[in-house]
Image: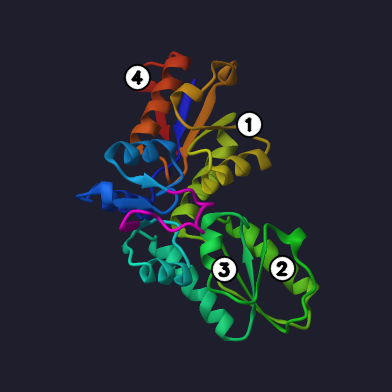
Amino acid sequence: MRIIRARAMGFCFGVRDALETARSVAHPERVAVYGELVHNERVQAELAERGFAAMSERDRQRLPERPEVLITAHGVSERERDRLVAAGKTLIDTTCPLVTYVHRVARALEQEGRLLVVVGKRDHVEVRGIVGDLSHFVVVAGPGEVEAYTDRRIGVIAQTTTPPRQAEAVVEAVRERNPAADVKYVMTSCQPTRDRQLAVLAMLPWIEALIVVGGKNSNNTRQLVDLAREQHVPAYHVQGPDDVEAAWLTGLTVVGLTAGTSTPDDVIEAVHARLVELAHVHPWRRAASF
């Protein structure tokens, strides 16, 4: 069996920078992580072992007890940031610059007097941060949720992990259902996420199944799984090597391997090694990059 690795996978620069910042903290016992630094269980365990306190992403009504608060790569609204500072907290900010860009675009579009249509998952921490500074918005998961709005000026943006084709389908639906509106679309899907999605699309014609490595709560990892399944290629979401089942590989000759942007390199390599072990492939023949 041949194992093809995606040409782009694993940590993006935003996640890598956030983790490096957390690892450089001298006194983690003074720091509460405001949610999940990244959506990866291995990283969360590492931070816990170092002494960081973890707050649930759904428990932000309660102020952290520790004096320092680490803002995760997913970001928070300016309102939430101000609330923390007003409570005397010192912030360690690891917000991804591409998420910061989405916040800036959203505020600018609203200042133009537009209804904001945000493409993404309503309950995702990144989306909650984006809309936290807005007063006139709707969140839609796809074109089927778009309605005819009373507003005559509409802006459309997307959560950074949204595939461009999904955001563009929403834009088309907004224009179809609001033909008299002035619709302005700013593409905010981030480049690292797009690179990983394009790498999967390039592999799909050549593989019989896809193994996708990433945290169970990682939205961009689930998007990679969905891309494969939409093209009728079996895809399996695993968090580590122990999740890989030998039955998935039975009778296959070519399998693809990719990983979400919050997946550490050593976890990817461990999954790869497990695939090699299960497939009984000689090490020098075990992989190719696509």
> What amino acid does circle 1 point to?
Pro
Callout in the foreground (3, 4): 3
Q: Earlier in the sequence, mark 2 or mark 4?
A: 2
x 44%, y 61%: residue: 75
Residue 283 marker: 4
Give the foreground label among 1 and 4: 1
Q: Tell me the SS state at disc 4.
A: helix
Left or right, 213 with reference to 17? right
**Which residue bears the numbered disc 2?**
172
Distance between mark 2 and mark 4 Cα atoms: 48 Å
**Sequence order check: which comes first, mark 3 or mark 1?**
3
Left or right of 222: which side holds 51? left
Q: Range of the magenta residues?
A: 55-69
In the picture, the quarter occupied by the C terminus is: top left
Q: Which residue is mark 1?
A: 234
> Label 3 neighbourhood size at 10 Å, few (<14), some (14-19), many (20+)?
many
Q: Residue at x 77, y 59 (%)?
A: 144
Across and down, in percent, residue 272 comes to 41, 27
